[in-house]
Amino acid sequence: MNNIAVKPFVDLSEFHVLGVYDTMRAWWLGGRNRVALDDIAWALGLESSKTSEVEGSRVFELYQAGKLAEIREYNLNDVRVTRRVFERLVASFGR
């Protein structure tokens, strides 16, 4: 943008950053495939963070409509689901 050269993002996926556990990478046992959090949750029998009113693709629309409480709750649910996935993966595969 504006003809400004930028450096590419640094890929830290090969490094073991202390305190970081990549649930998507653990799901694929270290592979490079991508998978949605909702799909992992479904496969593990966990409830989705999506609701009939909110899902990731609608966040900007909801923001424009001033529905910040709904966005907040969706984001909190995403964190809760991520935590449950993390706990299940650690219990199954270890850290």
Image (spheres, rainbow, N blue to C red):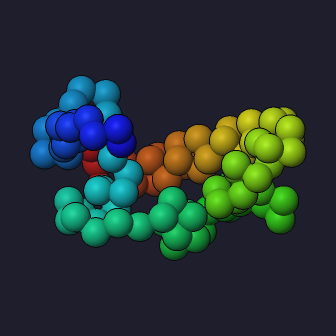
Q: Is residue 64 above or below residue 38?
A: above
Q: Is residue 21 visible?
A: no
The percent coordinates of residue 55 (x first, y second) are: 70, 59
Q: Is residue 61 above or below residue 40?
A: above
Q: Residue at x 79, y 44 (%)?
A: 64
The percent coordinates of residue 30 (x first, y second) are: 20, 59
Q: Nearer the viewer, residue 57 or 5?
A: 5
Q: Nearer the viewer, residue 44 or 74?
A: 74
Left or right position of 9 against 20? left
Query: Which quadrant would the C terminus be assigned to in this image?
Result: top left
The percent coordinates of residue 59 (x first, y second) are: 70, 50
Left or right position of 69 against 84? right
Left or right position of 91 against 76? left
Query: Which quadrant would the N terminus be assigned to in this image?
Result: top left
Q: Residue at x 80, y 48 (%)?
A: 62
The percent coordinates of residue 20 (x first, y second) are: 31, 34
Q: Is residue 53 above or below residue 39?
A: above
Q: Residue at x 84, y 59 (%)?
A: 53
